[in-house]
Image: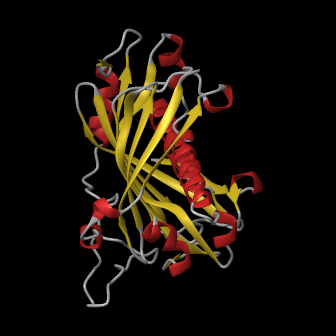
């Protein structure tokens, strides 16, 4: 199903010359609302009954190219698995030429007012079952890295680069950092929980604070290259982050090289882990294509 059709990138969606990484989360959420409405299971009705609609359980995404001011983005969303209470959706994001922008794969459940996952209505489950597509995209930080033109990114040996091949031999020597944020009304959605799009913003803010504490800044490192853009992630969601709680971001750097900075994230709400996963940050040029990090950009991680 075409859930977003030729959306033009607007000024307010940009962070510098490229869109903010949180937009990928937003497009996935908007697309989820579109496909659920099409099968008669509307967010509006779920929220009205006190539920949390289609909360992510596992969210994995790989960015192939960052859109810029002159781009349009379309999203096709299809179900690939449906259970009693969950549905797994694949999101294929493309630009105006039909070239890949990002691929997402998310499993969703609807949370009951008293907690726990609600079973999907029979009609909704049958509608998803009728639309199931046989796709199994490899996305997230452990997937082979793919360029926007579909070609694999190869290492110096000529082999396709795998994320696990980039692990540092002594990852425990790499830095850790953390930051805490109050979850205020600008960060929440209709269910009075932190909005899905806000989580990568909080993670980005923690990373930027680490760079400043290390004697540099994202602004100083940016120019023709745009470093530390969220590129590949797999996050698991165990509990919601409520309004007026304190969200703590703990970041454990696990690997650093010219292609990616790999971070193990734990996001906790008032001391309770809510989100855990792996995030890889990449470097992109001003047209949105993936490029290597400079040594200057990586220095804070190697000297900490």
| Quadrant housing residue 112 | top left
Q: Residue at x 37, y 9 (%)?
A: 114
Left or right: 233 in relation to 190: left
* Residue 196 image point, x, y percent: 51, 37
- 48 w.r.t. 270: above or below: above
User: 158 or 281: which is nearer to us?
Assistant: 281
- 94 w.r.t. 160: above or below: above
The colouring scheme, among rainbow, by chain, secondary structure or one colour, is: secondary structure
- 282 w.r.t. 92: above or below: below
Q: Residue at x 37, y 31 (%)?
A: 273
* Residue 71 image point, x, y percent: 66, 66
What residue occupies the far right of the structure in this picture?
11
Left or right: 239 in relation to 219: left
- 260 w.r.t. 177: above or below: below
Q: How many marks overall?
A: 0
User: 284 or 32: which is nearer to us?
Assistant: 284
Q: Residue at x 48, y 11 (%)?
A: 50
* Residue 60 image point, x, y percent: 36, 50
Residue 131 visible in the picture? yes
| Quadrant housing residue 69 | bottom right
Left or right: 277 in relation to 49: left
Residue 39 visible in the picture? no
Q: Residue at x 69, y 70 (%)?
A: 220
């Amino acid at each position: 199903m075409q859930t977003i059709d030729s959306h033009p990138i607007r000024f307010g969606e940009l962070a510098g010359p490229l869109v903010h990484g949180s937009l990928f989360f937003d497009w996935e959420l908007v697309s989820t609302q579109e496909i659920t409405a099409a099968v008669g299971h509307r967010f509006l009705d779920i929220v009205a009954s006190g539920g949390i609609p289609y909360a992510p359980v596992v969210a994995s995404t790989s960015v192939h190219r960052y859109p810029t001011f002159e781009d349009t983005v379309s999203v096709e969303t299809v179900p690939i698995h449906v259970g009693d209470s969950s549905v797994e959706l694949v999101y294929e994001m493309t630009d105006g030429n039909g070239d890949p922008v990002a691929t997402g794969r998310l499993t969703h459940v609807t949370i009951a007012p008293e907690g726990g996952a609600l079973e999907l209505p029979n009609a909704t489950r049958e509608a998803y079952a009728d639309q199931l597509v046989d796709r199994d995209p490899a996305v997230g930080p452990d997937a082979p890295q793919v360029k926007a033109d579909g070609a694999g990114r190869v290492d110096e040996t000529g082999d396709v680069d795998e994320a696990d091949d980039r692990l540092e031999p002594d990852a425990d020597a790499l830095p850790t950092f953390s930051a805490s944020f109050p979850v205020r009304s600008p960060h929440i959605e209709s269910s009075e929980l932190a909005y899905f799009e806000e989580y990568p913003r909080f993670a980005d803010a923690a990373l930027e604070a680490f760079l400043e504490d290390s004697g540099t800044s994202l602004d100083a490192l940016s120019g023709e290259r745009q470093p530390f853009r969220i590129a590949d992630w797999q996050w698991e969601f165990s509990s919601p982050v409520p309004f007026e709680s304190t969200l703590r971001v703990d970041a454990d750097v696990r690997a650093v090289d010219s292609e990616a900075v790999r971070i193990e994230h734990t996001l906790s709400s008032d001391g309770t882990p809510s989100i855990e996963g792996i995030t890889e940050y990449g470097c992109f040029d001003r047209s949105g294509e993936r490029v290597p990090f400079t040594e200057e950009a990586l220095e804070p991680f190697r000297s900490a």
